[in-house]
Image (spheres, rainbow, N blue to C red):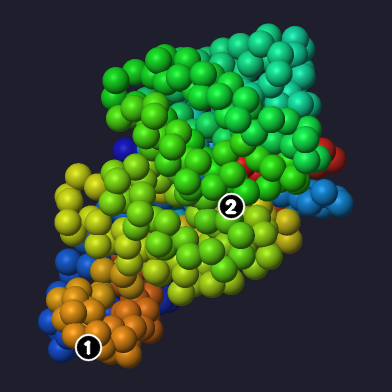
Amino acid sequence: MSETIIATDVVAHDNAAREADLRRDYETLSERLDRRGIAIDAIKAKVAGFGVAVPSWGVGTGGTRFARFPGTGEPRDIFDKIEDCAVINELTRATPTVSLHIPWDKAEPNRLKQAASRFGLGFDAMNSNTFSDAAGQSHSYKFGSLTHADKGARSQAVEHNLECIEIGKTLGSKALTVWIGDGSNFPGQVNFSRAFDRYMDAMRAIYDGLPDDWKLFSEHKMYEPAFYSTVVQDWGTNYIIASELGPKAYCLVDLGHHAPNTNIEQIVARLISRNKLGGFHFNDSKYGDDDLDAGSIDPYRLFLVFNELVEAELADESFHPAHMLDQSHNVTDPIESLMLSATEVQRAYAQALLVNREKLLGFQEENDALQATQTLKAAFRTDVEPILALARLESGGAIDPVAAYRASGYRARVAAERPAVAGGSGGIV
Ligand SMILES: [Mn+2]
């Protein structure tokens, strides 16, 4: 039995005030779904089995190029971060794993493993960092890492990725995510082809160090920190990388790493069709890589992405892409944002499970555009909150995670234990 951080009586007390209403709402929804031929308990079981990883860097307050306004009780180190992640999972029962970032979270691997297993947490993909310089490293990444003109810098970046794999082996991780900040700020600054050739050589060296049961995720991003060109700029380049590296290499899609209005769900479908979709970094955006909370701006787009994922899951039971949140919390309590974001991702999944795929196929075959799109809308419009809330309750979580969290006084308690830090590690990848 795992330890809990939030007192169980606090959660039980908050749940008790909401449970009768929840059960009535669930019963009503059950009747409505029954009329559509959908068994609500089967949807609930799938939702209960759905997990999304929390990034260790997400529990600290984020910032912009202009400023960072620290919150209270911010985690001082990876062990505080793991406790914050445990709180998120305790209340939502939707985030059973943590994704680490090296070197930010570097600590003795067995201590990390113990700290997480105390709360029943596991580890998701390892994330390397060659987009900023760590203290004491020989070569700077100011002008690139895996694609740097200098072989010494490239080798150092490869070695760092191999070290992340070693740490991950002890932790029980099964994937390495590589995102590089390499690119250029001026036309002519780098040669596109030479930079990509160097990237592929470096990635082949990392791929060769990957255990057989691991996956290598490459993550594309169209701009930032380089503002004229990035080396892995879009899904096309990402697909070339994953295809050429081999069967353990997959593409990772960060929802924020595309131009505004890009049809991301179509990119998802393409990658699925070639068995190269490795996983997601969920967040939301309005203008660029805004790293806003998942589902906060365009929940319909999140639903449409899950519509593709559910289609793939129904066609192939072994289809299990990695799910992780990757967002920056600048004006909210990161724990509250991450709890709600995990719930939003679950919600999109539940709604996508409600799509009547037989009807949809019929409308597509008949070229009935209006009814086809209404079939999707019917699923999206369904308020699945009672399904999510009952799944949480039955797994030992909170019917209303934010209410239970606020009632627990956790933030005030850790604020007293953790002195405020002016800088602190943050970061968005
Ligand atoms: Mn990302």
**Is residue 349 found left or right of 113 in the rendered image?**
left
Disc 1 secondary structure class: helix
Up/down of 296 relative to 172, above or below: below
Specify whether 309 is left or right of 141.
Answer: left
Q: Position of residue 209 (x, y in %)?
A: 42, 14
> Residue at left 33%, top 83%?
373
Residues packed near mark 1 inside 10 Å, few (<14), some (14 to 19) or many (20 plus): some
Question: Quick check: is the Cβ at mark 1 less than 8 Å away from ligand 1?
Answer: no
Say which quadrant the N terminus sits in: top left
Residue 85 visible in rendering? no
Q: Which mark is residue 99?
A: none
Give the x, y percent position of residue 341: 51, 60
Q: Dot 2 lies on which element?
A: loop
Residue beneath disc 1? 32
Q: Is residue 328 left or right of residue 94?
A: right
In the foreground, 336 or 155: 155
Circle number at residue 257: 2
- Residue at x 67%, y 59% (from the top left corner): 288
Residue 239 in percent (x, y) is at 42, 41
| x then y, percent, for residue 186 | 81, 40
Could you tell me how far apart the alpha carbons at marks 2 and 1 are, in whole angstroms? 38 Å
Q: Residue at x 71, y 14 (%)?
A: 150
